[in-house]
Amino acid sequence: MKCMKSLKALHHQLASSTAQIAVLENGTDHTLPLFSDKLRAEELYPLRPSEITIFQVNVGKMCNQVCKHCHVDAGPDRKEIMTRETMQLCLDVLAANPSLQTVDLTGGAPELNPDFRWFVENIRQLGRHVIVRCNLTIILSNKRFFDLPQFFREHRIEVVSSLPYFTQDRTDRQRGDGVFDASIRALQLLNEAGYGMPDTGLQLNLVYNPAGAFLPPAQETLEKEYKTELLKRFGISFNQLYAITNMPISRYLDYLVVSGNYEQYMDKLVRAFNPAAAHSVMCRNTISVGWDGQLYDCDFNQMLDLEVACENSRHLSTWNMAALQHREIVVNQHCYGCTAGAGSSCGGTVTK
Amino acid sequence: MANHYYDAADLQKFTAIGEYQQELADKFFGWYGEVFKDSALTAKEKSLIALAVSHAVQCPYCIDAYSADAFEKGWSETQMMEAVHVAAAIKGGAALVHGVQMMNKTKAISM
Ligand code: SF4
Ligand code: SF4
């Protein structure tokens, strides 16, 4: 029987961010060069923001899936959820900071937050571009979500969805049995609503994550292959493919350790360190907001409880743009995941 | 001195062959890099060919490297095993077709 529980519900040692950081900093039997030293050699340390334009909000850790690589440790048993009051604080920050042009909503499955639609409507009223990290299967999981494609369309939301591969075996192995078929059906529904279709301007972008302990192949070639295969096999169209490197955090870290792949994977990331990618890591133009309103440099730091190094602006209620703009970004060994090869961010590879 | 042949860690030291002859090593790695780029054949197709050839030449380093590479590039386990069977079939066939030479020779020296 498949385990449908989060590490937290299992009282797993790696449910604790301290334990995860200990593995990352000390390895299992050998240590790696420090990420901060790599940045120093590039004269990038301490790492500082460029212009902050993306406001990423994690509206809760509840999810209808329990993917093996999930860096959030999300699942049906996770109860952390952003309240409407905290969402209001987000809206206040957005209203006061016009440079925050894009709001990137993530989770868990963000749609499971009962105030999700209210939040989206209000962000759109402020004229901001909204991205939703939709896991696809949520659309078919309950009839109250069947109209999500129409809701997305009505608010011109950009949809970004993970589909680890265009074949069932790899997708289901990573994301759970039946996920592939449900994802394909959901993509067809999004296409029917105009998403990913020419001339509608409704953006449907897919995410490739390696289904194992390896790095993604070149994004451009993979995108061509995805487009050909998804169209041929299922009549599906989409806009862009983002090839993302799995971060050695949470359930993916557990997978690496248990499968004996941790050391070789980290070695691979270190060997693939790309200075050009280090210049464009996403924490430089993003602020990540936790379900409870705490501020982080990125979603990964959020899951490791590494709060922004900005004492007077660590929560939405004390938001100080100038201070955040001048802060030092907190880096650690997991950051090698962002700088390997062509680099990796929520928007795919960062170098050409 | 090592007391065994083949060490998995040696694969990572491949580029160190330049230590004894840098110029030729550079030429080899430059050419090697070009060979595996997307061109008339895709890098993905080349990876599967390399996997098959690595079995034919029975190089454990190449088998490791191209098992990982072919899987990373999106070939399934079944496709990879079929490529190995193609290599094996060619190897088996190549041995067997020399049986004709054996037969020719045998016949030539028989009464
Ligand atoms: S990766 Fe996404 S869909 Fe999968 S469990 Fe995590 S939050 Fe849910
Ligand atoms: S993990 Fe976060 S802090 Fe580290 S480089 Fe990536 S985006 Fe920046």
Image (cartoon, coloured by chain):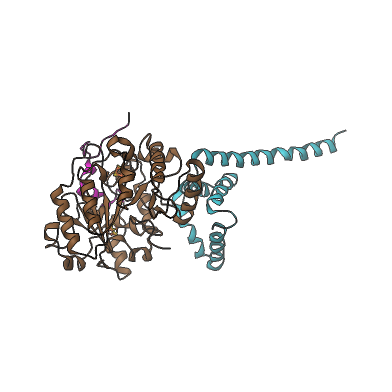
Chain colours: A brown, B cyan
Q: Per the image, is A11 magenta?
A: yes
Q: Is residue B103 above or below residue B31?
A: above
Outermost residue to the top: A1
The quarter holding residue A49 reads: bottom left
Ligand 2 is in which quadrant of the figure? bottom left
The quarter holding residue B110 reads: top right
Q: Position of residue A32 (x, y in %)?
A: 31, 56
Residue, x 64% and y 38% (percent of image)? B89
Q: Is residue A183 visible?
A: yes
Residue, x 33% and y 45% (percent of image)? A150
Viewer-proximal residue among A239 and A58:
A239
As drawn, is A352 to the left or to the right of B79? left
Q: Position of residue A144 (x, y in %)?
A: 27, 37
Disc tally is: 0
Q: Per the image, is A148 magenta?
A: no
Quarter occupied by the C terminus of chain B: top right
As drawn, is B5 to the left or to the right of A25? right
The quarter holding residue B88 reads: top right
Q: Is residue A83 above or below residue A277?
A: above
Q: Position of residue A165 (x, y in %)?
A: 43, 44
As drawn, is B51 to the left or to the right of A300? right
Residue, x 77% and y 38% (percent of image)? B100
Q: Position of residue B108 (x, y in %)?
A: 85, 38
Outermost residue to the bottom: A43
Viewer-proximal residue among A22 and A315:
A315
Stretch in magenta: A1-29
Q: Is residue A108 visible?
A: no
Viewer-proximal residue among A34 and A186:
A186
Q: Is residue A175 above or below residue A318?
A: above
